[in-house]
Image: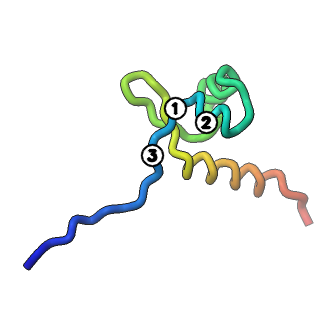
Amino acid sequence: MTETPHTSAVSPLMHSRDIATYLKVSESTLSRWRSAGTGPPFIRLGGIARYRIDAVDAWLAELERDHAPQE
């Protein structure tokens, strides 16, 4: 019997400068958001913040829901 390795589609880790460009904010703004805990989720590897684009998109979607007009 042959086992098939379980693989999941996980978005790659991206550098903060790439995410800052994606969000159209400066890297210092992204850094402030990290410090305040208000920005997109990130992973710190060896002291360097990395982001998954899927997590950033989910964070943006949540912001849209939070700021949608109340009916």
Q: Residues within 10 Å of mark 1 (few under 14, many from 20)?
A: few
At label 2, which amino acid type do we have? Ile
Is the Cβ of the residue at disc 2 closer than 8 Å to that at disc 1?
yes
**Label ID, residue 15:** 1
User: Residue drawn at (59%, 33%), measured in percent from left and top?
Assistant: 18
Give the structural element (helix, strand or loop) at label 2: helix
User: Residue drawn at (61%, 40%), measured in percent from left and top?
Assistant: 40
In terms of sequence position, does the residue under pointer 2 or pointer 3 come before the other?
A: 3
Residue 7 located left or right of residue 34: left
Residue wearing tag 2: 19
**Label ID, residue 12:** 3
Q: CA distance from mark 2 to mark 3?
A: 12 Å
**Label ID, residue 6:** none
Give the structural element (helix, strand or loop) at label 3: loop
At label 1, which amino acid type do we have? His
Q: CA distance from mark 2 to mark 1?
A: 7 Å
x and y percentages locating residue 29 in the rendered image = 70, 24
User: Residue drawn at (74%, 49%), measured in percent from left and top?
Assistant: 63
Image height check: is 52 above or below 1?
above
Quadrant location of the N terminus?
bottom left
Give the structural element (helix, strand or loop) at label 1: strand
Image height check: is 11 above or below 47?
below
Is the Cβ of the residue at disc 3 closer than 8 Å to that at disc 1?
no
